[in-house]
Structure formats: C-alpha cells, structure tokens
Amino acid sequence: MPTLTPNSFFLFTLRFYFLFLGGLALLLFPHPSYSQENPYIVAYDHNLEEPGSLEVEYFSTFGTQRSGPDFHAYWTEFEYGATAWWTTELYLDGQTTFGESTIFTGSRWENRFRPLKNEHLINPVLYVEFENTNGADKILKEVEGHDAESDYALPNAAARRDHSREMEFKLILSSNYKGWNFTENTIATKNLSNEPWEFGYALGASRPLAMKGAAHRCNFCRQHFVAGVELYGGLGDRYSFGLNNTSHYLGTGLAWNLPSGWTFRFEPTFGLNDNSHQFLLRWGVSREFSGFGSMVSGLFKGHEE
Amino acid sequence: MKLYQFVIASVLLFSGLVAVAGPQASPNQHEKESVYAELKTAPEKYRERANPLANDADAVAAGDILFEEHCEECHGKEGIGGKKAPSLRAEEVQSSPPGAIFWILSNGVVRKKMPVWSKLPEPERWQLVSYLKSLGRAAAESKSPAKP
C-alpha cells in the first residue's frame, strides 16, 4: 500500500482545492455567458476574453507512447478578461501515466495583449507566459525546439525531479475573414537556466458551420458548431534552427458552443513524423461566467447605494 | 521557489489582478458620451454600407437572441443600458447609420471596455444591427399617439 507522505498529501489537497474552486465557480456565478469559441487547443487567435468575464476550462490529452506506457495529461485554465485588450490566465497541469502514477506537473501564468485599437486584416496579439513545470509535464500545449516523443518516455518518478522555469513569447497573427478565422503563432521559449532559445509554430483555420444566427432558440443549430484544423510543431533552437529532429502534429477539431455558456471541444491529432506521438486525442470543456470581475472588485469597494 | 509556493503566489497574484482590473461601476455621463462619440469615428465607407439583411424577415428575431447571448450582460435587457455599458436606445445610436453600428461591433472600443465582435460572422453582426435598429422603431411607436 503506498504511504502518504507530507508532499503527496499536499498535492492531493491542492488538487482537491482547485476542483473545489471550479465547482464553487459553477455555483457562485449564476450568469453564464455564451462564448463563441474556436476549436483550437494549441493555436491562439486574436479574440480575447470579454472584460470582466472568467472562463473556467478543463482540457485532456490522451497520448500514445511507443517506448513507454500511454498517458493522460490534463490542465485547468482560469482565463480572465482584465480589459478588452488584456487577457490573463492561470494554468494548473497534471498527468497520469498508465501503470505508473498520477502527478501534479506545474503551473503557468499567461498574458495576452492586443496592441492595436481597431480590427485589421491581420491582427497581432502579444503573448507572454511564465511556466514553472517539472520534466513529467505532458500536456503538449505547445511544441517547441527539438521536442520529441522519446522525451516523454522517462518514468514519472525520474522525470518529475527535473524542474524547468521558462519564459515563453508568442506573436499571434490572426484574421477573421468572411466567417473564417486564420491564425499563425510564432513561438520563442527561453529556459531560465543556461539553455538556448527554442522556437516553434502553430497554424490554425476554422469556420462556423452556419454564418447566420437562427431566429429561434436551439442547442443543435449549425451556428453553434465551429470546425477547424490546426498544424503545429517545433523549429529547433538558436544553434540548430529548422525542421531537423523536430516533431509536428495535425489536428482536426470541432467546438460546440452551447447557449447556456458551456463549450465542448474535441480534436483527434496525428503525429506527422517519427519524432511525434502517433496519436493524441484531445478534448476540453469550458464555461464562461460574466460579471466575475465586478463581483471580486465589489468585495474590495464596499456597498454601493 | 518550490512548486507549491509558486502556485500559491500565482493564485494570489491572479486574484489581486482580478480585484484591481475588475470593471468599474456604472459608466458616468462622460464615459457614455465618449462611447457614443466613437460611432462618429466610423470611416465613411462603412457609414455608407446598407444592411444586407434589412429586408430579412428573421433578422430582428435572430438579432434578439444574439443580443441576449452576447450584449445584454453589459447593455441591459433590450438595450436599456446596464452597469457597465450605456443604453443602445439613445438618440446617438438610433440616429447612426447601420454601417456605423456594424463598424463599432466589428472593431469594438477596446480602450473603453467594449470588446471586438469580429469573431461573429458578418451576417450575425448585421442581424444584431437589425435588432438594435428595431429598438428605436419600437420606442418611437410606443411614443406616438394611439389611433382612434
């Protein structure tokens, strides 16, 4: 029988705490708001969170592993629209490697800024993220440098001893044109230890299944479904930039945006070369709550007459 | 810094940001006027655009549903104005050409909390314009004297 060490007790408590927070959010905020989300799981577009809204998201990745056991990695996101031009997010990551263990693998704090006031044909968004993860992190939220399937074969017990603190920067260039969204993300990552800059990319295209809203209320109307495709991979590092020894993936996704505020995403993803996992099954569920910012800021401002 | 210390610090920082950057209370008169003034900044080529769904019998009903889903939280029920955003029944909005309203929906007023709605396909934005314009007609009809 496994012993419960203080550390494992802490991690169990932490996971329970964040599950509790997610559940509490569902109970506390009776104002879910409809969100029109794209099906991307890796790529970002230029559409930011509405100001004052909180989106609570859960994502899962089931991954095959040729030189080791398959895994199920997952993360929770708390995405908040601080202003109409700034969105901030907190991520908590974990994973289960079948036949090994379930572990908490780290957290990330991400910020996206929209520098231009108006909508243009191509809209830039600047992305800055700080990651504090361990070597067992398998969420594959982005692929960069020379990331390869074999990196994920190390047993959890050994991999989790390796800690990594990284700054990640992205330039997101995205367009909405005739109902389509096209997006391109250029990724540059710097491990804060003495390691070189690493690079990666993500491309995406998506479109709702209907362009017009229906004149009646419905959950299954075509305008609530958005289909898309995304392609992402690594581009080497500062000393060996290019496609050599890099991994690449192609995913086809579908998002179902329910009027009740829930969004479901589903994306089967296929590795495109020998360095990639052969197959990833990714899915996610999220719910957007409007009025979260007003509620929290109200706590600090006293009662308004 | 240990992992759990980082997580706790991140949660505290995130909560602090939400508290500091949370939307303010009801827009004051100056804020309302400055948001309305944005309608006048719409480029001429947009102002001249006619609503392609002006004669679509379903556009107002569909726009009503879209308004409820995306806009009502800030602009209030049927656009009467809310805690975070001004009334859309105001003269400044109702007298603006449909193309100017479409332009504001497409570009937002991001420095004044109005998000960009270009993620909605163009026909849905025009449906919203149809609905917003119908609010002005409804108000005018309710003010006109009853027929004998």
Image (cartoon, rainbow, N blue to C red):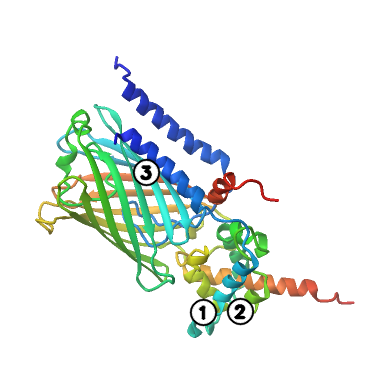
Q: Let me know if residue B68 appears in the view.
A: no
Q: Give left or right: position of A157 versus A295.
A: left
* Chain under callout 3: A
Q: Which residue is mark 1?
A: B42
Crowding at mark 1 (Cα within 10 Å: few <14, some 14-19, many 20+): some
- CA distance for labels 3 and 1: 39 Å
Query: Which residue does the image show at 56% across and 69% down from the upper left?
Result: B127
* Residue farthest toward the right in the current orientation of the protein: B148
Query: Which residue does the image show at 63% across and 74% down from the upper left?
Result: B93
Q: Which residue is mark 3?
A: A91
Q: Give left or right: position of B44 versus B8.
A: right
Q: Which mark is residue A304?
A: none
Residue B46: percent from the left, percent from the top?
A: 50, 81
Crowding at mark 2 (Cα within 10 Å: few <14, some 14-19, many 20+): some
Residues at marks 3 and 2 touching, judged by CB atoms closer than 8 Å? no
Q: Residue A149's quadrant in the figure? A: top left
Q: Nearer the viewer, residue B116 or A305?
A: A305
Q: Is residue A73 above or below residue B28?
A: above
Q: Which residue is mark 2?
A: B96
Q: Is residue A68 above or below residue A229?
A: above
Q: Nearer the viewer, residue B89 or A70?
A: B89
- CA distance for labels 3 and 2: 43 Å
Q: Is residue B29 above or below residue A217?
A: below
- Co-location on one chain, circles 3 and 2: no
- CA distance for labels 2 and 1: 10 Å
Crowding at mark 3 (Cα within 10 Å: few <14, some 14-19, many 20+): many
